[in-house]
Amino acid sequence: MVGYVIVPGIGGSDDEHWQTLWQRQWGAAAARIRPQSWSQPDLGDWVDAIDRAVKEVEARADDVVLVAHSLGCWAASAWLREAGIRPPRGTLLVAPPDPAGERFPGEAAPTFVDVLPHPLPCPSVVVASANDPYCRLEVARDLATNWGSRFEPVGSLGHLNSGSGLGDWPQGRRLLTGLTSRGSTPTSAA
């Protein structure tokens, strides 16, 4: 059985966010990170929260998949660098913000802004929108290259959050299914 670790961005994902809708469908097969610093993000706290959620899911699943959005992509990347366990089956990185961009959340800057992208130890996909206010498409493509991830542009859908009106986001589910299907090989940047 595959288990999922939900890694939202600042403040978590609201009730209409695709991460929340997916988590409801997965039930006990999913766990959401619970950092103490949701609104004033501290990278160490978020990495610890991912570690706790992964252990929770590993207790009941054969494989773990990280499902990250926005700032959560950077926390997932940092956790993957530090994780002393076997890598997860895959990581979905949706709408990572550009740390060098003018819209990068100032409250996250003290601990998140210096995190550099590095090759991830598992198959991964970076999903990006052409009109994301937090990251230009070209920057998202570069992040995918540096993470060793497949790059998936999905049109002009904003920040790929509840404000984008994605609902259950079937396109994202297909990307996740492709990432986690048995026999999938490590991804390469497009």
Image (tube, helix red, strand yellow):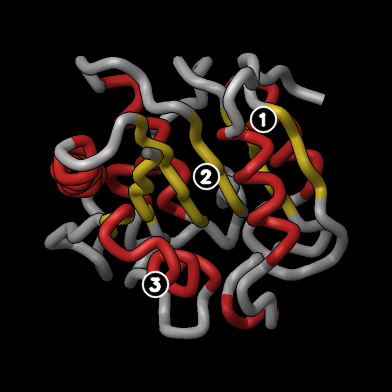
Q: Are marks 1 and 3 in contact (CB under 8 Å)?
A: no
Categorize mark 3 by other alpha carbons within 10 Å: few (<14), some (14-19), many (20+): few
Question: Which amino acid type is marked by label 3?
Answer: Arg
- Where residue 25 sits: x, y (%)? 44, 69
**How would you rate the neighbour count of disc 1 (Cα within 10 Å): few for under 14, some for 14-19, many for 20 or more?**
many
- The residue wearing badge 1 is 144
Choose the circle earlier in sequence order: 2 or 3: 3
Q: Residue at x 41, y 51 (%)?
A: 72
| Circle 1: element type | helix
Q: CA distance from mark 2 to mark 3?
A: 31 Å
Query: Callout 2: helix, strand or loop?
Result: loop
Residue 99, numbered circle: 2
Q: Label 3's element?
A: helix
Could you say which disc has been placed on residue 24 in the image? 3
In this rendering, which labeled residue sits more in front, label 2 or label 3? 3
Quadrant in which the N terminus appears: top left
Across and down, in percent, residue 185 comes to 64, 15
Packing grade of label 2 (10 A; few <14, some 14-19, many >=20) is many
Amino acid beneath label 2? Pro
Q: Amino acid at mark 1?
A: Ala
The answer to whether 101 appears left or right of 46 in the picture is right
Which label sits in the foreground, 1 or 3? 3
Inter-mark Cα distance, 1 to 3: 28 Å
* Looking at the image, residue 139 lies above or below residue 163: above
Distance CA(mark 1)–CA(mark 2): 14 Å
80 horizontally vs 184: left or right: left
Closest to the observer: 18 or 78? 18
- Mark 2 or mark 1, which is nearer the start of the sequence? 2
Q: Residue at x 42, y 32 (%)?
A: 77
Name the image quarter holding the C terminus: top right
